[in-house]
Image: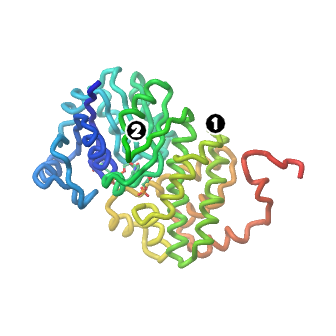
Amino acid sequence: MSHVISIIGAGSWGTALAIHLSKKGYQVYLWHRSEEFIKVLKYSRENKKYLPGVLLPENILLTSDLEECITRSNIVILAVPSQKIREISKRISFCLKPSQILVNVAKGIENDTLLRMSEVIYQEIPYNEVIVLSGPSHAEEVAKNIPTTVVVTGKNKETTELIQDIFLSPTFRVYTNPDIIGVELGGALKNVIALAAGVSDGLGYGDNSKAGLITRGIVEISRLGHAMGACVSTFAGLSGLGDLIVTCTSMHSRNRRAGIELGRGNKLENILKNIGMVVEGVATTSAAYQLAQKYDIEMPITSELYQVLYHNKNAKESVDTLMLRNKTNEMEQLTVPYYKNW
Ligand SMILES: NC(=O)C1=CN([C@@H]2O[C@H](COP(=O)(O)OP(=O)(O)OC[C@H]3O[C@@H](n4cnc5c(N)ncnc54)[C@H](O)[C@@H]3O)[C@@H](O)[C@H]2O)C=CC1
Ligand SMILES: O=C(CO)COP(=O)(O)O
């Protein structure tokens, strides 16, 4: 079947996915809210602000007319920052038919409600199916056909497999996973740990420190995820450990880069302005901190990062706090209760 796909949000991820899907031969609309921005894109065929150095294939239709592109497509990909997903869902809800499939690619937790992205979308658009795509996938590499692996999840197996087929290519391998909660939480919470890993780098700490943050990071993510109904093994998968590794180690990561600057002592406000793209981990740290309290889960890294971001705690003092916590047994801290009576 020939699909027509609208991508809502011409930032770095929306643009990379538009390039990927257009190369597969689909009719792709790429939408940006500013008419002026679209005019420049049409002229230059390059998204200089969000994804410089990559040409947009001619078969990508660039538009700022939301209603036009939505009504012409059967698949709609939401690629705006997570805190804007509700706003954009409200806007498109009026022109959607129930048969159109929504694919969310934003990674975050809504700050006011503490809801996952698919929950937010279902609240605004209850009659359409929502599929989530997540995993270790920096836009800069996907746009260059660098081998990438991701995961898709949704309530309905057939629709999830349809979206798997649509995205699948020799350089973009797509797995399915039925655990929506785990996939969404992994994708959102890894940004918190990536910010912390950046802070560690910015403070001049080393590879040992980062390996510790990644490993203990996935433990606290799994602990919260388990309490929220996720399957713990999902956190060992692409949307969990996979995305955590790439975001904590890649210089493409906006979260890691923001963390490095924080660790060097720069002000958050200036850092975000300089990066000029969304740094999801900032809002997600606050959401994760609140969720940890709500579910009474110990999340020491998240908690310290929250103090650094929102209460100006000195980053080095936070590392000391983490290192000087009460001694404990690694296994006791895991969500799977092996060795309970050891
Ligand atoms: N860049 C990447 O490599 C990847 C990003 N993601 C996720 O995709 C989501 C989007 O990220 P990026 O494209 O990287 O962000 P970005 O900052 O590069 O672009 C965001 C886009 O959303 C638009 N936008 C912002 N507020 C809006 C609003 N209220 N209404 C309409 N449009 C609005 C901006 O104009 C911009 O075009 C994030 O949740 C991110 O975590 C997921 C995987 C990879
Ligand atoms: O989610 C991503 C890669 O999988 C993108 O991470 P950043 O938002 O930190 O750039």
Q: Which residue shows up at 79% across the image and 62% down it?
A: 328
Residue 239: x percent and y percent?
52, 46
Snapshot quadrant of residue 131: top left
Give, as a three-letter code, the residue at label 1. Gly
Q: Kindly tell me whether residue 42 is visible in this rendering.
A: yes
Of residue 124 and residue 203, the one placed in the foreground of this image is 203
Q: Which residue shows up at 22% across the image and 38% down it?
A: 29
Q: Which residue shows up at 27% across the image and 34% down it?
A: 5
Q: Kindly tell me whether residue 63 is visible in this rendering.
A: no
Of residue 1 and residue 50, the one placed in the foreground of this image is 1
**Which residue is label 2 attached to?**
104
Residue 258: x percent and y percent?
43, 66
Rendered view: 25 above or below 11: above
Image quarter of the N terminus: top left
Rendered view: 208 above or below 18: below
Q: Which residue shows up at 51% across the image and 39% down it?
A: 115
Q: Are marks 1 and 2 in contact (CB under 8 Å)?
A: no
**Which residue is label 1 attached to?**
229
Q: Residues within 10 Å of mark 2 (few under 14, many from 20)?
A: many
Residue 107: x percent and y percent?
45, 47
Spot the residue most to the right: 341
Residue 259: x percent and y percent?
48, 67
Rendered view: 342 above or below 194: above
Q: Residues within 10 Å of mark 1 (few under 14, many from 20)?
A: few
Of residue 211 and residue 298, the one placed in the foreground of this image is 211
Give, as a three-letter code, the residue at label 2. Asn
- Give the CA separation, mark 1 to mark 2: 20 Å
